[in-house]
Image: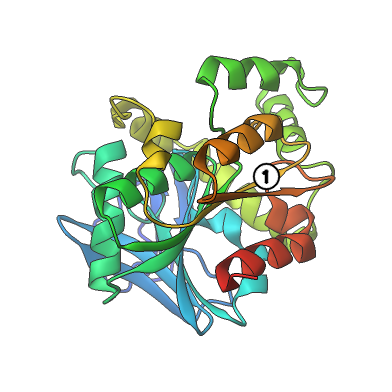
Amino acid sequence: MSADRPTPGTPDPRPPTSSGNKGFFDGGRFFWACEYAGVKQRGPRAAGEVSLWVEIEGEGDPLLLVHGGPDLDHRYFHPGMSILAARRRLIYVDLRGRFMSRTKQPLGFDQDVRDLAAVMTTLGLESADVFAHSHGGFLAAAFAKAYPGRVKKLILCATPWGETQEEVDLRVLQSPAAARAGTLEERRRVRESLYFFGLPDKESKRYYDKVIEWHESAVADEFRRTYQPPAAVPGIEDLKGLKCPLMFLAGRDDPHTSTVKLYEASRELDPQAKVAVIERCRHMPWVERPEHFKKAVEGFLSGT
């Protein structure tokens, strides 16, 4: 047994994000820390009262990536987001309680918002562009509202705006991709069909599967039991108060978002907000349509 790995079935005695920690045990399984080859800097960073797992890839102006869930982690951004690394310094974060950012401190939406500010501060960033996916879009919008001036430009990807959660849930259930699922394997297949037209390439699928493995673990179950949702999910009225330019980005066939509602929201926010819709794409455009995704993101961030 390696010195990095405690005896199977016993608790990991090390703090979850201490120097040299390669992962952790949960229910007899060992979860390795993210080893994505494109990342040159990785490890825990102090962020106020907690340490958060942070990875940095690429050169250029910073782009903070906010993952969705809320019970997912940054790894599903690998390797697709690397398509932006030639021009951008990508900052991946596991928000508190997710994967390598395990903590006994309070968990919740409001804490996540403060943690985003703390991560930027510890990295020496007064401001940065922000890309946020799915549930992360609500976090990023709340962050931009709570900390004016810290977000230069905001991309809200696959986040539903201008509709209730009940409307979103109904559309997902009515999607041709949705199906009854009883077993764990059936639920996995349904989730994949809601996220992708077809299976991703081998590396994207490998990292996606890693996230789902953690998502189905006991430690993730505990996270969901203790995570405090926001008192009110941010809506269009909250976006109206933002000072930064923003773009709604969505796959045309993503059942989690309504492109009609996004265009309506954009008109309400005109000229502050733009909309980019990627054809033949569902929930993760950097996986399914990387070149189209790159063109939309780089075009918005560069102002073209």
Q: Which residue is drawn at 61% across and 63% down?
A: 78
Q: Residue at x 68, y 26 (%)?
A: 187
Apparent side of residue 171 relative to residue 68 in the rendered image (left or right): right
Query: Which residue appears at 77% of the width and 61% of the height?
Result: 292
Q: Position of residue 126 (x, y in %)?
A: 27, 71
Residue 201 point in image, percent of width and height? 80, 58
Question: Which residue corresponds to mark 1?
Answer: 250
Q: Nearer the viewer, residue 125 or 215?
A: 125
Residue 159 in view? no
State left or right for residue 37 relative to residue 68: right
Local crowd size for mark 1, using a 10 Å CA cut-off: few (<14), some (14–19), many (≥20): many
Which residue is depicted at the point 58% across and 73% down? 302
Residue 258 drawn above or below residue 183: below
Image quarter hosting the C terminus: bottom right
Q: Position of residue 253 (x, y in %)?
A: 78, 36
Quadrant of the rendered structure where residue 105 is? top left
